[in-house]
Image: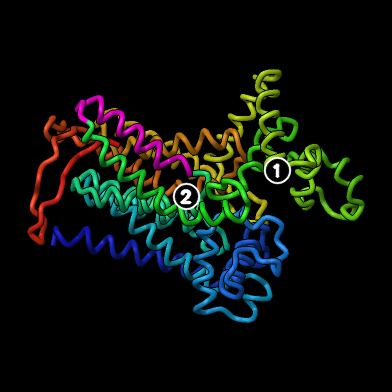
Amino acid sequence: MKRRLPIILAGLIVLLSFGLNARVAADPRSAYQSADERSYGKLAVDIVDKHDYGSPSTKMKEPLHWPPGAPVLFAVGYKLFGTAHDKQTYDIRSAYWEQALLTTGTTALAIALAWIVVGPWAGLLAGLIVGTYPPLIGATGDQLSEPLGAFLLLAAFVALALALKRRRLWWYAAAGALLGLTILTRTDLLPVPFLIAGLGGLIALIRTRTWRALIAPAVLAGAAVVVLAPWTIYASNQEGRFIPVTKGSAAALFVGTYLPGGGTTIGMKEHLEAQLRAAHPEYNGIKTYKIPAADALELFAAKHPDLPRDVALNREAKKNLLHYSTTQPFAFAKMQWAKAKRMWFFYYRGGGVHYISTPMRIWQVLLVLAAGIGLIAGVIRRRDPLLAAVLLTVAFSTAIHTIVVSQARYNLPLMPLLIAAGVAGAFLALRRDAPSPADDPATIEEWNSDESASGTAVARATPAS
């Protein structure tokens, strides 16, 4: 019974997660549809009906602003269960049930990650926190990419945990492929697989002084490239120049470096309100925050009429970064710190929701601090390579969002991973037994031949991430 109890409890936690998410999927927050939600819906319908990605019928100016992961997911739901209402409103009802299943899977993956790293009780605690995390449950009722991003990112690290534990190259390939799919959903994580592979390969090379140590990191990075390549080729052909995943980074970089607007979209529109209303008299009857951000950005893109819009905005963003960081370094640093706090110490509430729950805000801050401390403690005390890779991912994402646009919504794909890794790190740090050098997961061994279940020889290694 003692052996079965963790499995039974894990099943109950997964059922609880599904019940909470199914309730939201049955009554989603679709009264308000943000620009991103509507765009994902348009692209999903276009994929199925026109076999295109932003055809002229959608009237989308820049369909490549949005990565393809969420539109493809929603297109599957529309293809199988779509209705005329879905096509008319771009509010795809089956998308909410897809996200309910995905978030239930995220709970299961959180259990799996902490279980693999430490043991069942850490896994159960991680799964219980992730499965009942209100912002993640609420996101099931929004037609956005965050639930899919959270699922894929956590799945990638579960595969990486198994790769480090079982020392099989195909698990490294699976981790790389899943990170590639994550990037096709959340473009801001584009450098992550290459940072993990690069740092892990460098550490392995220093410790072993053999080029064989680079094989596993190369497999991980290579698998990510293979997954990204078809979309990159398509997007680049469509645009006539190299597009790694999306064209959306230039606008985010401009807004994030525009100090007079405080690094926020609403702040930018408020600072430019007079110019916007002068150029667009039709906006005189609406509130400032409802003015399309594209019109505000167009004021700066128009300074370079000979360049594509995103190239022009990228040039203006670089000017912002150089100008404000050198002429007003303290104000610029203060803005960056404010964006980091906004990303982690606020919680995702959903589009059109403007109130803040004080208990939820307190829980968010405590959860981020506790998980972060647990993660860092596990890395320092146990030198665990998986936790180090998670820390690298979280640190990079935080750093990039102190430069580009920062919102509480952007912590959502990272929170399940941070929670699971934080719980695992805390359990590792508090565990009394010290790992022996032979059991240290960061140790790099020589490649050996091992017999697989089918009797064929396979390579085995333990590179550090």
Of residue 338 and residue 358, the one placed in the foreground of this image is: 338
Q: Residues within 10 Å of mark 2 (few under 14, many from 20)?
A: many
The answer to whether any part of residue 359 appears in the image is: no
Q: Could you tell me which residue is drawn at 45 percent across and 47 percent down?
A: 415
As helix, strand or loop, the secondary structure at mark 1 comes to: helix
> Left of 153 or right of it: where is 83?
right
Q: Could you tell me which residue is drawn at 8 percent across and 53 percent down?
A: 451
Question: Which amino acid, mark 2?
Answer: Ile
Of residue 381 and residue 309, the one placed in the foreground of this image is: 309
Residue 183 on the magenta segment = no
Identify whether 127 is placed above or below 362: below
Residue marked by disc 1? 265
> Left of 298 or right of it: where is 94?
left
Q: Magenta segment, principal secondary structure?
A: helix
Of residue 22 and residue 292, the one placed in the foreground of this image is: 292
Task: Give coordinates of residue 207: x percent, y percent.
Answer: 22, 26
- Span shown in magenta: 190-210
Residue marked by disc 2? 183
Mark pair 1, 2: CA separation: 23 Å
Colour mode of the rendering: rainbow
Residue 191 on the magenta segment = yes
Instruction: Tell me which corner region of the image, top left, top right, bottom left or bottom right, holds residue 311.
Output: top right
Task: Give coordinates of residue 341: x percent, y percent.
Answer: 56, 35
Question: Which amino acid, mark 1?
Answer: Thr
The answer to whether any part of residue 254 appears in the image is: yes
Q: Could you tell me which residue is drawn at 72 percent across and 39 percent down?
A: 312
Q: Tell me the tag on residue 195.
A: none
- The quadrant in which the N terminus is found is bottom left
Counting residues from the start of the chain, the first of labels 1 and 2 encountered is 2
